[in-house]
Image (cartoon, rainbow, N blue to C red):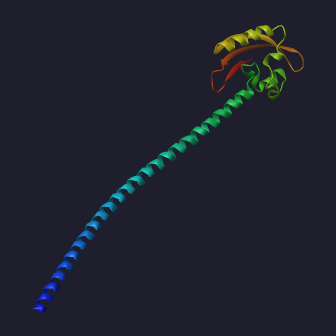
Amino acid sequence: IFTKILEKISNSLQEIAGGTLVKSSTKKAGKLVEIEKINRLLERTVAQQASQIRQLQEQLEKEISQHRRDNQALTKSEAKLQAVLRNSPDIISIIGSDGRVRYHSEALQRVLGYNSEERIGKFYGELIHPDDLVAWQAYFGKLLEAPGMAGAIEYRKRHADGSWLYMESIGNSLLYDSSVQGILINS
């Protein structure tokens, strides 16, 4: 009886152990399947993101290349403009709304004998003949009132050697143009 009971207990323990192992193995197999699914999903996600990164990198390289071409064109255009301004026979000036010179082209030296940098910050009208100053002030007032081109004006301007030269100027009010913010005078 005792042997039979031991055999039954032993068999029962083996069944329990076998069932636990089967259940444990089944759980582990389920977890492995789940982990494999997650790994495949992660691999797909990583591959998609790597593809997107490559596309973005190619797009960035194209934009950098375009930026370089644009920058070269801008540099070329700026050099061309500087050459035109340097060699133009006309004096090109930018005057602030306060009447002070903010820019003179190099033609100022050739035409009137003044260094253009030395005239920056000075009043534009201080070299105009006293008899022509009132007409200039009225002309300048019109330019301050309305944007755009004004008709031509003639006046005398003092040369560095003390003589008077007749000038013809055309003004263009670009006070509201953010790149100029002044009155452009071509003389």
Q: Nearer the viewer, residue 134 or 107?
A: 134
In the rendered image of this protein, does residue 75 appear above or below residue 109?
Answer: below
Residue 98: name its quadrant.
top right
Q: Nearer the viewer, residue 119 or 175?
A: 175
Number of marks: 0
Tell me what residue is drawn at x 46 percent, y 48 percent. Answer: 56
Q: Is residue 181 left or right of residue 7?
A: right
Tell me what residue is drawn at x 37 percent, y 55 percent. Answer: 45
Tell me what residue is drawn at x 71 percent, y 11 percent. Answer: 141
Q: Is residue 11 left or right of residue 37?
A: left
In the rendered image of this protein, does residue 118 appear above or below residue 99?
Answer: below
Rendered location of residue 32, percent (x, y): 29, 67
In the rendered image of this protein, does residue 52 appear above or below residue 125?
Answer: below
Rendered location of residue 169, percent (x, y): 73, 14
Rendered location of residue 92, percent (x, y): 73, 22
Q: Nearer the viewer, residue 180 or 17?
A: 17
Position of the N terminus by quadrant: bottom left
Residue found at the far left of this picture: 1
Residue 85: name its quadrant.
top right
Residue found at the far front of this picture: 2
